Image: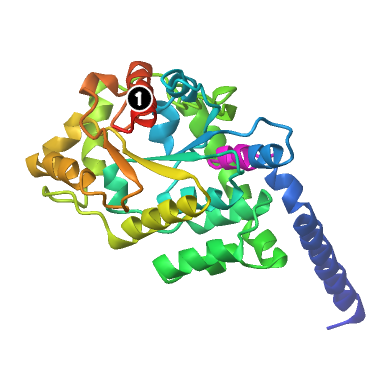
Amino acid sequence: MDAKTWKSGVTMGGAVLVGSLFGFALMPAVFAKVPTDLERTRILLKSVRLIQSDKLVAPDVVILGNSVTMNGVDASLVSDQISSKPTIYNFSSTGQSVAESFLYFQELVAKTKDVVLVVPTRNLETDGLPPKDVANAFYMNGYRAKSSTLATLESVFGTGSEILSRNEVSQRFASRWVLSQVVDTVVRKKLRKDMETGESIQSLTYPAPYSKKIGVKEFAKLLPTYEAKRASGPFEPIDAQVEIITKMGEQLSEHGARLWVVFAPLNPRRFEILGPDYLSSTMTYSQLYPFGKNVKVLDLTAFLSADEFIDVVHPTRIGAEKISARIGNFLETGT
């Protein structure tokens, strides 16, 4: 290799290195701006910081869950059913698993005395730890898992803490997924005209992302995909899901707060695949205090009709009004 070629290679290698370091340094700023499927996580963690710094009114009640809760629970309507008219925030987000809901527990303020976990029963049969991208999104948005949080994840799932406890360098490099998802997110928002991408997604009251019913043909195509890996039969939650929710209730009880669990409505059309034993078994299960004596369960699995769903899983506005009123009554009366 002659001197000119060697010098050119060194220059190019140096440019790549400088570019990589520059990109590495900019990742936090990039992460905070680009659109992704986890924008809602960014909004919620920003709200957490505002609450903790007294720049946003602290909630008496926090509601957690996935997009079913985003579309199906209006926190203001829940509050209307309670005589004390508490401040209630809907902290649900797209794809939020039970373990992801648990991550918010360490951020709750003393004023928060009630946490409502809204979860579809099917998720209790399948969900596990948050995906690596979700854990990385938490970190890049300022979340730092406490040792007690990591210990709970380890005790329940036997793993998982390493995803949240990586060092700064590892987290920044891991955050490169956000760049590859930008195009997908932008395209999907253009194709899904029924998705709300403006003020709604930022709401701490009713962050409903879906507003328009899908067509009959599209529904028929999507329905089987939700139960593709499940034969008909009774409700069978996995042990880890039961344990993490039980620990949630215990943790809140230690701080003078309380956990309320709501089994979210399932579209009745799904029972065509799940079978007749599924519904009766969820009802029986909910009455057995499965998550400890201090955790009451409200089973809304069969609460809505098929026409009160926008698609296979998300309630319409009318459905949301019914769900919200029922949850408010649950909190007010305990039944």
Does 55 lie within the magenta span? no
Residue 150 appears in the rendering: yes
Q: Position of residue 264 (x, y in %)?
A: 31, 35
Count how many numbered circles sit on residues in the image.
1
Q: Which residues are magenta?
A: 33-45
* Residue at image coords 41%, 33%: 69
Answer with left or right where residue 117 lies relative to residue 279. Answer: right
Q: Nearer the viewer, residue 132 or 59?
A: 59
Residue 177 appears in the rendering: no
* Residue at image coords 34%, 20%: 213
* Residue at image coords 32%, 56%: 242
Label 1 neighbour load within 10 Å: few <14, some 14-19, many 20+: some
SS at badge 1: helix
Q: Position of residue 168 (x, y in %)?
A: 71, 64
User: Which image quarter: residue 283?
Assistant: top left
Q: Residue furthest left?
A: 276
Does 34 lie within the magenta span? yes
- Residue 296 in the image: above or below residue 125: above
Q: Nearer the viewer, residue 48 or 10?
A: 48
Q: Nearer the viewer, residue 283 or 230?
A: 283
- Quarter holding the C terminus is top left
Question: Which residue is identified by label 1?
Answer: 329
The amino acid pointed to by label 1 is Asn
